[in-house]
Amino acid sequence: MATFAINSLLNYKTEKYIVTKNKAVGVLHRLFQLSVIGYIIGWVFIVKQGYQEIDDAIQSSVITKVKGTAVTNTSESGLLVWGPEEYVIPPQGEDVLFVVTSFLETPNQKMGYCSYKVANARCSVNKDCKKGKMVESGHGVMSGKCIRNNENSNGTCEIFGWCPTEKDIKPQKPLLKNAENFTIYVKNFIQFPKFSFSKSNILETTDQSYLKKCRYDKKQYPYCPIFRLGDITRRAGCNFQDMATLGGPIGIVIQWDCDLDKGTSHCNPEYQFTRLDATVSNKSIAAGFNFRHARYFKNAAGESYRSLYKVYGIRFHILVHGKAGKFAIVPLVINIGSGLAVMGAGTFFCDIVLLYLTTGRKSYKDKKFEVLKYEKQHTSTDVDIS
């Protein structure tokens, strides 16, 4: 019994092949095989580079710096010169930054009691002004008094807060008109840890004046990381002056697709510029971007004052994506094996056609399948009684 089991394990079994002289099925089989081979070579290996190991866990660092100067002249603050220290928020250079293009100023606010006509602080009598109730548009709380010009008119609740209150208006044009010519310096370092490969988006040169004279151009200066704000909005499909009035967000996408088999020269940054609120109409209440901040000071008498700024501008979001590929034997074998397995499906499909869809299907079925009938043999034993 043991000898039989060992012999069975050592035996080699092969499949039985039947040659069928059916040209239509033969052509169908070859076309299927050629399609699979074309898919493996063309799509898997050439387009998708299935012979490479991929690292898409990109590690990235982004540092930004904005340069430029603008001058404004308003009735509230007079003649002012704006540098990056005033119009860039936050000033330390992150991957998300805001550039002021317009503003509304409420100067010389002082903490105290004031009454200005605000939408949600109208009153007729004192009881309409609940003491301590917050007034959002007035940036304060009600004192409990209703201030009226006379007994027959409606009034406004007295507010304790920073006076005078902010005016409820919108800018009609950007005040920092020269902001279109500001430049933003985007320094990006990337690393693919699986391949211990790192690179930056800055040209490796010893020319100290390179960054002072270059501006990004996809063909002439692909490794110049300095962008003009007007060019960024134009590439995003926007008019800078229109966008600068009420503000809005813009995405700067840096895409790294690196083929390390071809060397570092085939690992270059590609930039895309998109207005992130492009689906929002300019007439919509969701259009634009603004926020408030204040500058505090004291007069000679030691009294505290502030100037409130409602600033409008462009918020830049710098996003970094990428992947790197390098030849490896494991993905190569896996993709070749997958292709061979798919080719086996062609034989199965052609068998289905021959067994069920052709006129000679009965003859093919008889040749393909052999039925072995097992008959139990009985042995008789003669018993001699003598």
Image (cartoon, rainbow, N blue to C red):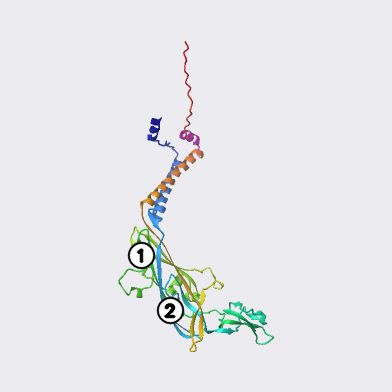
Please identify the quarter of the rendering in which residue 273 is found.
bottom left
Counting residues from the N terminus, which is met first, the one under dot 1 or under dot 2? 2
What amino acid is labelled 2 in the image? Answer: Glu
Q: Disc 2 designates what residue?
A: 85
Q: Which residue lies furthest to the top in this view?
A: 386
Camera-side mark, 1 or 2: 2
Residue 199 location, x and y as percent? 35, 65
Q: Which element is circle 1 on? A: strand
Q: Does 237 appear above or below 70?
A: above
Q: Magenta stretch: give its range.
A: 358-368
User: Image check: 151 left or right of 371?
Assistant: right
What amino acid is labelled 1 in the image? Answer: Lys
Q: Which residue lies furthest to the bottom in this view?
A: 301
User: Image check: 209 left or right of 161?
Assistant: left
Q: Residue furthest right?
A: 152
Residue 256 location, x and y as percent? 40, 63
